[in-house]
Image (spheres, grey):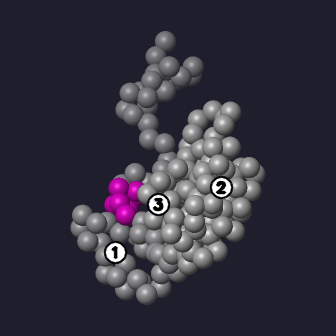
């Protein structure tokens, strides 16, 4: 959301393999719109590929869809951030969530009136709703992550313990122990 170029380093691939989790790397790249590099940091696997692909880093076109009231506020704040060179949408979401450090850093560029309006929007969105505004933003992001995961991963087949196997055989109505 900040509009910065990046590549996605998919670490701990050894653990995913051990657990039988399959990740469709080309589909994940397509879905995210950025290079995806599988790695195992503890062994160095994939680190050369990561370094080789750093020049391929790019901005992702993947967009989080927030609830309608938050989208309206983000759009309004983006208009107040026209003089900010990068990522007004991401910055708007961060300020709505209450990032006071960011607000103080941008204050010289946006001015007191815009800062006051952003704080007012944040208060309006926080009033009368259960949970925090930051929590609502996070849940919207996690919904997107869940959708991408569902598209790009195949979970490991369920493992049955020896006890479950023994129970299944011994309590079977035909060949189980009476």
Residue at image point 68% right, 43% down: 124
Mark before the other along the chain sequence, 3 or 1: 1
- Mark 2 Cα shell of 10 Å, populated few (<14), some (14-19), many (≥20): some
Q: Which residue is mark 1?
A: 46
Q: Which residue is mark 3?
A: 104
Identify the disc placed on residue 117: 2
- Mark 3 Cα shell of 10 Å, populated few (<14), some (14-19), many (≥20): few
Of labels 2 and 1, the one closer to you:
2
The N terminus: image quadrant: bottom right
Residue at image point 55% right, 56% down: 95
Q: Eyeballing the image, is 97 above or below 56?
A: above
x, y percent for residue 126: 63, 40
Residue at image point 39% right, 34% down: 161
x, y percent for residue 127: 66, 37
Q: At numbered mark 3, what does the secondary structure look like: helix, strand or loop?
A: helix
x, y percent for residue 130: 63, 33
Who is closer to the viewer here, 6 or 116? Answer: 116
Q: At numbered mark 1, what does the secondary structure look like: helix, strand or loop?
A: loop
Q: Is residue 81 magenta?
A: no
């Amino acid at each position: 959301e900040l509009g910065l170029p990046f590549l996605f380093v998919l670490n701990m691939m050894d653990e995913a393999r051990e657990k039988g989790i399959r990740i469709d790397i080309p589909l994940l790249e397509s879905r995210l719109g950025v290079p995806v590099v599988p790695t195992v940091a503890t062994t160095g696997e994939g680190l050369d590929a990561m370094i080789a692909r750093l020049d391929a880093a790019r901005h992702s076109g993947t967009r989080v869809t927030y609830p309608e009231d938050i989208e309206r506020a983000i759009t309004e704040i983006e208009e107040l951030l026209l003089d900010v060179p990068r990522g007004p949408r991401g910055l708007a979401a961060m300020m709505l969530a209450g990032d006071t450090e960011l607000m103080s850093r941008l204050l010289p560029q946006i001015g007191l009136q815009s800062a006051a309006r952003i704080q007012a929007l944040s208060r309006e969105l926080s009033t009368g709703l259960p949970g925090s505004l930051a929590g609502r933003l996070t849940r919207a992001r996690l919904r997107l992550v869940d959708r991408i995961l569902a598209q790009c991963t195949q979970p490991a087949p369920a493992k049955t313990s020896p006890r479950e196997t023994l129970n299944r055989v011994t309590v079977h109505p035909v060949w189980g122990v009476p």
